[in-house]
Amino acid sequence: DTARAELDALYSATDGEAPVSPLRFATVIAQRDWEALAAMCAPGFVEHDHRSLALLGTSQEPAAWANNFRVLVD
């Protein structure tokens, strides 16, 4: 818990808009809140699956990425 709190403090100490904290990301995944996961993405978000066995290809929007993530987690 202490380490996570330290990470959250580091992330929130950045100038301007703070990025999503690792704790928030983990919480959203644990709660299976896929809409909240998509809302964490920046405008214009695109995810490219570069793994050698690419199953997902390219996700062109946050909702598609969150859905792919949901399928992998479930």
Image (cartoon, rainbow, N blue to C red):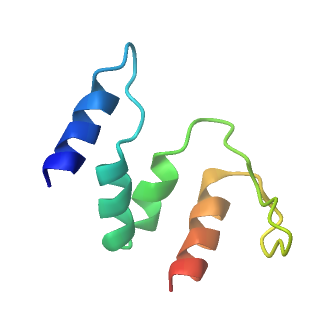
Residue 66 appears left or right of 56: left
Residue 51 appears left or right of 30: right
| Residue 11 x %, y % | 34, 31
Answer with the quarter of the image where residue 68 lies.
Answer: bottom right
| Residue 37 x %, y % | 46, 57
Is 54 located above or below residue 4 in the figure? below
Closest to the observer: 38 or 15?
15
Q: Pick the quarter of the image with the N terminus.
A: bottom left
Q: Residue furthest left?
A: 2
Residue 24 appears left or right of 35: left
| Residue 43 x %, y % | 61, 35
Residue name at image x 40 percent, y 40 percent: 20
| Residue 35 x %, y % | 45, 61
Q: Residue furthest top?
A: 15
Q: Residue furthest bottom?
A: 74
Answer with the quarter of the image where residue 59 lies.
Answer: bottom right
Residue name at image x 59 percent, y 81 percent: 71
Closest to the observer: 17 or 5?
5
Is 47 located above or below residue 53 in the figure? above
Count of marks placed on residues: 0
Answer with the quarter of the image where residue 7 lies.
Answer: top left
Q: Residue furthest front?
A: 3
Closest to the observer: 66 or 26?
26
Residue 66 appears left or right of 55: left
Residue name at image x 83 percent, y 65 percent: 57
Is 64 located above or below residue 2 in the figure? below
